[in-house]
Image (spheres, rainbow, N blue to C red):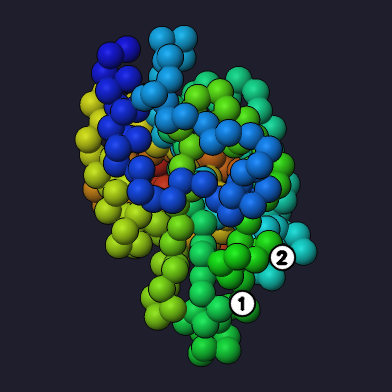
């Protein structure tokens, strides 16, 4: 238990400057509730800390039904995740990392700038916000003392970042955090889109972290092209386990 508590304190220190808190929270919740205290500043003996991390990749409005770059199954997958984290599944994780595209309006990936995608997840827009039902589940977890950290990527106009690990600022901090934990059982990954950002996140993760400790939550992912097999092939080649909620 002491090692787990130490790990939580390390995480707070490592991620304290990442801007933990989505614009939803800043705009909609700032006046409704106090900002939850970091776990290291709370009475923590009542909360057992399972040594596992969950990385939720880009669960944003623009990637679900009606969004600028919508996936067919995105809303269903993120609703399933929201329900799971509202129940006992939440107790499986001490730390939850939520990655978000936070693009400037002139981002290089946009068609108008010579890229391949329509404008999406522009910082400050509704499309960049976390899917509301999932966001509410995450806020509830924050209130209960769990570590939930929102980490942006793709915030430079001239650089594409399909994975948070490709972001110089947040990628470095997350790598260091993962590498510093002792008795760390593993990392689960889910989110949107399977064939882009989820695939790249898993690929970058296993470059420095044992693939045997990584799992993909296969019913909480959604693809732009559901026939794409990149992630499935990567999992097979590296013996990465798939689980379901």
Is residue 157 positioned above or below 224 on the image?
below
Q: Residues within 10 Å of mark 2 (few under 14, many from 20)?
A: some
Q: Do the residues bearing badges 2 and 1 touch, measured as CB atoms within 8 Å?
A: no
Asked if residue 104 shows in the view, the reply is yes
Q: Left or right: 132 with respect to 217? A: right
Asked if residue 232 can be seen in this view, the reply is no
Q: Which residue is the site of mark 2?
A: 67
What residue sits right under mark 1 in the picture? 119
Q: Position of residue 172 (x, y in %)?
A: 27, 53
Front in this rendered view, residue 132 or 65? 132
Q: In which quarter of the image is residue 171?
A: bottom left
- Residue 165 occupies which quadrant of the picture? bottom left
Residue 13's place in the image compared with 184, above or below, is below
Q: Which of 167 and 36 is in front in this view?
A: 36
- Disc on res. 29: none
Q: Which of marks 2 and 1 is nearer the N terminus?
A: 2
Q: Residue 95 falls in which quadrant of the image?
A: top left
Q: Which residue shows up at 36% across the image and 43% down it?
A: 16
Question: Residue 130, image x and y in percent?
Answer: 62, 51
* Numbered disc 2: secondary structure: loop
Label 1: which secondary element: loop
């Amino acid at each position: 238990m002491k090692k787990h508590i130490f790990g939580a304190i390390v995480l707070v220190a490592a991620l304290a400057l990442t801007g933990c808190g989505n614009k939803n929270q800043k705009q909609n919740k700032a006046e409704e509730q106090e900002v939850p205290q970091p776990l290291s500043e709370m009475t923590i003996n009542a909360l057992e800390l399972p040594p596992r991390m969950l990385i939720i990749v880009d669960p944003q409005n623009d990637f679900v039904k009606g969004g600028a770059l919508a996936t067919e199954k995105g809303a269903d997958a993120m609703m399933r995740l929201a329900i799971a984290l509202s129940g006992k599944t939440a107790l499986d994780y001490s730390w939850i990392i939520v990655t978000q595209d936070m693009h400037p309006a002139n981002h290089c990936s946009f068609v108008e700038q010579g890229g391949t995608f329509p404008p999406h997840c522009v910082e400050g827009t509704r499309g960049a916000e976390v899917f509301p039902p999932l966001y509410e589940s995450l806020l509830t977890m924050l209130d209960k003392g769990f570590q939930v950290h929102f980490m942006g990527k793709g915030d430079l106009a001239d650089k594409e970042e399909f994975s948070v690990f490709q972001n110089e600022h947040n990628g470095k901090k997350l790598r260091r955090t993962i590498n510093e934990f002792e008795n760390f059982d593993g990392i689960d990954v889910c989110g949107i889109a399977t064939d882009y950002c989820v695939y790249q996140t898993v690929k970058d993760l296993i470059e420095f972290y044992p693939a045997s400790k990584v799992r993909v939550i296969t019913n909480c992912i959604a693809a732009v092209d559901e026939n794409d097999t990149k992630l499935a092939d990567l999992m097979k080649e590296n013996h990465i386990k798939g689980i379901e909620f």
